[in-house]
Image (cartoon, helix red, strand yellow):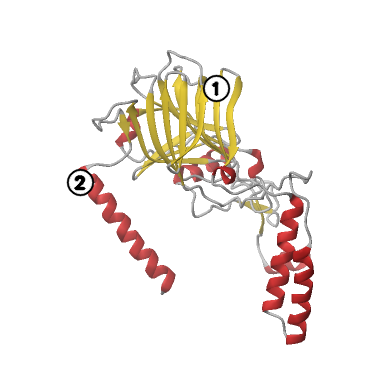
């Protein structure tokens, strides 16, 4: 193989890794960065910046970014979304400028970032958000935390699947389900009636088996989620005195007691997680939190006037909707023609 590579090619990029190769790198052992179609532009720029160790300017989208202090990483407005990009292997944090002066607020947000990683809303924060309440989704779980400088106290944590009403299953039950599905597929596409009958006979025997459940001592099954899976969740957070309520996709998911604080700063957090590494994702260590249609209101206020929102209004909203429809039309033609 090595002989033919050197014979047929003048250079060879044979490993996914970094976009920078040194002068003394072998021309037949070069690495390359493989961007994904869902990467925001700042994701690519962040990778280039830290791969090459050169300074560059990140994209901010439009003037709405002036309402935010970028404490870590990068941030860009795109339509009605604020995309927060992390530093490699760390976090991206932005803070809303102009202290709201409100410790009791209601927050509505649509989370659309990658399933691997953390997307959280930071409430009742101090000026650098090292002390705050953190509410959001982390690695397939809804979490509520009290952050105090270098320590974190978890107030609530539950899998999204459980909150969606899906009962947890054991490893043995999952293996049993896989065997059932396998035999059903083999029977459906068997080459002959005899083989189909044989698979159906095995399927009947497997279905009679009773795998060990979690209640019977079975190990809980933890599904392996695709690195490229995307979130599509809405969060409604209501903070009233010592009570914090979270609604997930319109349904109440958590209600916890929280400590009192005079701090009122609000921020957004996007955090990378080491579990994102996989055979398909060997080198990407940057994470993007996508916070769409963020609306912050004074708790209990009913006149509809938000303290802050990323939702577009008037002519800008009209242009955004038209552009979305046009992109949908183009996407349809690209898929079908």
Residue 327 relative to residue 94: left or right: left
Q: Which residue is mark 1?
A: 146
* Residue at image coords 33%, 21%: 98
Residue wearing tag 2: 315
Q: Secondary structure at mark 2?
A: helix
Q: Quadrant of the N terminus?
A: bottom right
Which of the two residues, 100 or 32, is positioned nearer the viewer here? 100
Vertical placement of residue 190 versus 24, above or below: below
**In the rendered structure, are the residues bearing label 1 and label 2 in contact, judged by CB atoms less than 8 Å apart?**
no
In this rendering, the label closer to the viewer, 1 or 2: 1
Q: Residue at x 55, y 51 (%)?
A: 229
In this view, which residue lies farthest toward the left?
315
User: Measured from the top left, where is residue 209 in percent x and y?
Assistant: 79, 61
Q: The C terminus lies in which quarter of the figure?
A: bottom left
Residue 198 visible (yes or no): yes
Return the x and y of residue 328 as percentages of the image width and height: 35, 61
| Residue under the point 49% across and 52% down | 38
């Amino acid at each position: 193989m090595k002989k033919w590579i050197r014979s047929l090619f003048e250079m060879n990029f044979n490993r996914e890794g970094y976009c920078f190769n040194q002068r003394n790198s072998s021309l037949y052992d070069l690495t390359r960065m493989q961007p994904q179609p869902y990467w925001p532009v700042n994701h690519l720029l962040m990778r280039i910046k830290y791969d090459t160790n050169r300074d560059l300017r990140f994209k901010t989208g439009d003037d709405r970014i002036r309402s935010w202090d970028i404490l870590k990483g990068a941030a860009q407005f795109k339509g009605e979304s604020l995309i927060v990009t992390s530093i490699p292997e760390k976090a991206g944090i932005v803070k809303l400028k102009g202290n709201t002066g409100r410790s009791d607020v209601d927050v509505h947000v649509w989370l659309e970032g990658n399933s691997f990683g953390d997307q959280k809303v930071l409430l009742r924060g101090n000026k650098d958000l090292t002390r705050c309440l953190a509410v959001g989704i982390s690695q397939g779980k809804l979490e509520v935390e009290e952050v105090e400088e270098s320590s974190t106290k978890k107030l609530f944590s539950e899998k999204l699947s459980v909150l969606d009403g899906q009962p947890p299953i054991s490893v043995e039950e999952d293996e049993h389900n896989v065997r059932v599905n396998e035999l059903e597929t083999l029977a459906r596409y068997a080459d002959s009636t005899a083989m189909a009958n044989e698979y159906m006979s095995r399927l009947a025997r497997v279905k009679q088996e009773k795998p060990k459940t979690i209640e019977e001592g079975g190990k809980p099954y933890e599904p392996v989620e695709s690195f490229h899976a995307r979130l599509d969740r809405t969060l409604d957070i209501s903070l009233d005195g010592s009570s914090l309520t979270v609604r997930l996709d319109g349904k109440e998911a958590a209600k916890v007691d929280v400590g009192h604080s005079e701090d009122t700063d609000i921020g957004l957090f996007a955090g990378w997680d080491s579990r994102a590494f996989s055979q398909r994702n060997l080198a990407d260590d940057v994470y993007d939190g996508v916070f769409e249609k963020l609306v912050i209101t004074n708790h209990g206020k009913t006149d509809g006037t938000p303290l802050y929102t990323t939702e577009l209004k008037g002519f800008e909203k009209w242009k955004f909707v038209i552009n979305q429809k046009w992109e949908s039309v183009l996407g349809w033609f690209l898929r079908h023609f």
